Image: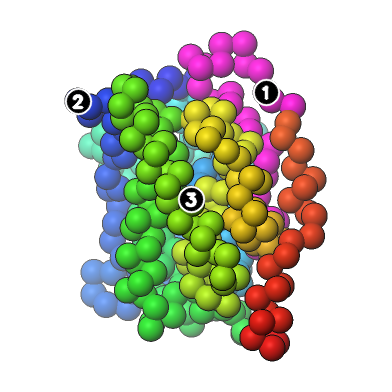
Amino acid sequence: MATSEDIHEINKQGSFVRQKNRFITPFGDELGQLPVEAGRYRLLWARICPWAHRSIIVRELLGLQDVISVGTAAPIRTDKGWEFSLDKDKVDPVLKIQYLAEIYEATDPEYTGRATVPTVVDVLTGKVVNNDYFKLTNYLETSFKRFHKAGAPDLYPESLREDIDTFNDMLFHDVNNGVYKAGFAKSQAAYEAAYDRLFSRLDELEERLSHQRYLFGDKITDADVRFYVTLVRFDAAYYSVFKVNRNRIIDFPNIWNYAKDLYQTSGFGSTTDFESIKKGYQLGNLENNPYQLLTKGPDISIWNEPHDRNRFDEKVGK
Ligand SMILES: N[C@@H](CCC(=O)N[C@@H](CS)C(=O)NCC(=O)O)C(=O)O
């Protein structure tokens, strides 16, 4: 099993710094871009991973399941990294690899970074073409538009793109990655700074969601997908494992109902696996959990309880 030392870069102040993505060529129709074709790419993920979960949700919402195939690694990273041990003979049936690292090695033997999910592989060449988790959902929303199902939501409307980008940037630093900054901090000051920032952002978002159903009004956007993947991991993992315990998500009335609303929306709950999330975060780090105990709670059945977010529809007379 990997230790946190292998993978987490820490700066002089004891703060966690995330590695840069290596494969960042965009998808598109211009020269030098990755050609947008159906059946050409395979998206590799692990159910624990919030960065990968985003793309999986967007793929579902947009109806791209037959356009981009998916390979799923087991939730607990091994010493050799992500392993396709959920598959028959522990091998991804399409790429015929046991470990994700094998495809990075085959793509670039000089690559010294980590093999991370999400990873997009070109099945034609068997090479990694993109692991840009930050932009991947945007490519699915824009470059893959011609393959969207009829009636697919516009998750990245042109008129809102700038605002969504600014929001997503804040969300990344303070919330999505904020929980990791608190959890991986190696100094009290770095931990507290991340903790304070995270909860002050959550307080702001609680307020924002008190007067509209979703982050950008009455329709789901890319920003909601990004917020959801952190929310759904919070009480089951981050609250205890990353020590972000001022309060739980279920203690914020608006955020909690919003999270349930999304969970109960097709594509969100169906791709959420609490068992994998708990295992991945709680058992994935031997140093912090030497006896490998898995928490019995929290009760996840409450995610299916009714939410109150329809109240906004009534307001606009729908
Ligand atoms: N590629 C990004 C984000 C994706 C990411 O962190 N994925 C995690 C799982 S949630 C991963 O694959 N980690 C494997 C590793 O760190 O070796 C990064 O390296 O920071």
Secondary structure beneath label 1: loop
Q: Which residue is mark 2?
A: 12
How far apart marks 3 and 2 lie (CA) works out to: 27 Å
Q: Please rate how many residues cluster around mark 1, counting C-alpha atoms within 10 Å: few if below 14, some from 14 to 19, many from 20.
A: few
- Residue 196 lies, with reference to residue 50, above or below; the image says above
Q: Residue at x 37, y 29 (%)?
A: 191
How far apart marks 3 and 1 lie (CA) works out to: 27 Å
Q: Which residues are magenta?
A: 267-296
**Foreground tag (3 vs 2):** 3
Relative placement, left or right, of 219 versus 307 is left
Does the segment drawn in magenta span residue 276?
A: yes
Q: Which residue is mark 1?
A: 294
Say which quarter of the image contains residue 254. Answer: bottom right
Q: Residue at x 37, y 43 (%)?
A: 197
Say which quarter of the image contains residue 18. Answer: top left
* Circle 2: residue type: Lys
Q: Which residue is mark 3?
A: 202
In percent of width and height, residue 274 lies at: 68, 41
The quadrant of the picture occupied by the C terminus is: bottom right
**Foreground tag (2 vs 1):** 2
